[in-house]
Amino acid sequence: MPSLLFGISKVEISEDGTTWTDLGATKGGVEFTQDIEEREIMSDQSTDPVAVITTRAPKTLTINLLDATPNNLALAFGGTVSSNTVTIPAIVTGVEKQIKITTQQINNEKYVITIKRAKITGKSSIRLNSDDAATVPLDVKVLAPTTGDPVTIEKQAS
């Protein structure tokens, strides 16, 4: 049987990687992207590059939360919560967290994607309409941790 990545079971955040908070339901899922930036080294004697060097590999996440709790809204917009009121400052600096995404179990297997150091930027939008429930997108930049790799994708069998 093939190994499949299918759906989201849960999305969690943590300050330190020991205590995790479930962010609730998602709609439209999570998009994990890795771009590759390269530099071509050219020679005067050739029209083709003599080497191609990867200079950066930025990684980003977009998490579409369906659960519009005050805490999720504050997280998405870089704000704070007090008595169920979200306050968004004039200048948003974002917040750093650890993020863990667990896929749904298929064929007795699931995947856990862990980002050790993620900056939730505060760049977000909410589209309100009468056709469907709004989602609250989290814009996330993956940052380099002090040790180890920034992202792990672990296949787990049950």
Image (tube, rainbow, N blue to C red):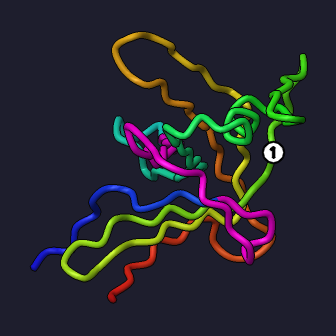
Left or right of residue 79: residue 156: left
Check the image and report above or below for 102 versus 57.
Answer: below
**Which residue is found at the position 72% from the left and 36% from the top?**
70
Residue stretch in magenta: 13-42
Q: Depth check: 67 or 46 in front?
A: 67
Total label count? 1
Q: In the orientation shown, which residue stands out farthest toward the left?
A: 1
Relative image position of residue 121 (x, y in whole percent): 73, 36
Q: Depth check: 117 or 58 in front?
A: 117
Q: In the orientation shown, which residue stands out farthest toward the bottom?
A: 158
- Main SS of the magenta part reads strand
Check the image and report above or below for 110 versus 98.
Answer: below
Check the image and report above or below for 80 versus 9.
Answer: above
**Which residue is found at the position 45% from the left and 44% from the top?**
26
| Residue 31 falls inside the magenta stretch | yes
Relative image position of residue 39 (x, y in whole percent): 53, 42
Query: In which quadrant is the N terminus drawn?
Result: bottom left
Q: Depth check: 157 or 93 in front?
A: 157
Neighbour tally class for label 1: few under 14, some 14-19, many 20 plus, Cα within 10 Å: some
Relative image position of residue 4 (x, y in whole percent): 22, 67
**Which residue is found at the position 80% from the left and 38% from the top?**
94
Query: In which quadrant is the C terminus drawn?
Result: bottom left
Inspect the image, locate mark 1, and give the three-letter code of the amino acid beneath it: Val
Left or right of residue 98: residue 128: left
Left or right of residue 77: residue 36: left
Q: Quadrant of residue 85?
A: top right
**Which residue is found at the position 67% from the left and 40% from the top?**
72
| Residue 101 falls inside the magenta stretch | no
The local secondary structure at tag 1 comes to strand
Relative image position of residue 60 (x, y in whole percent): 56, 44
Query: Label 1 belongs to which residue?
Result: 95
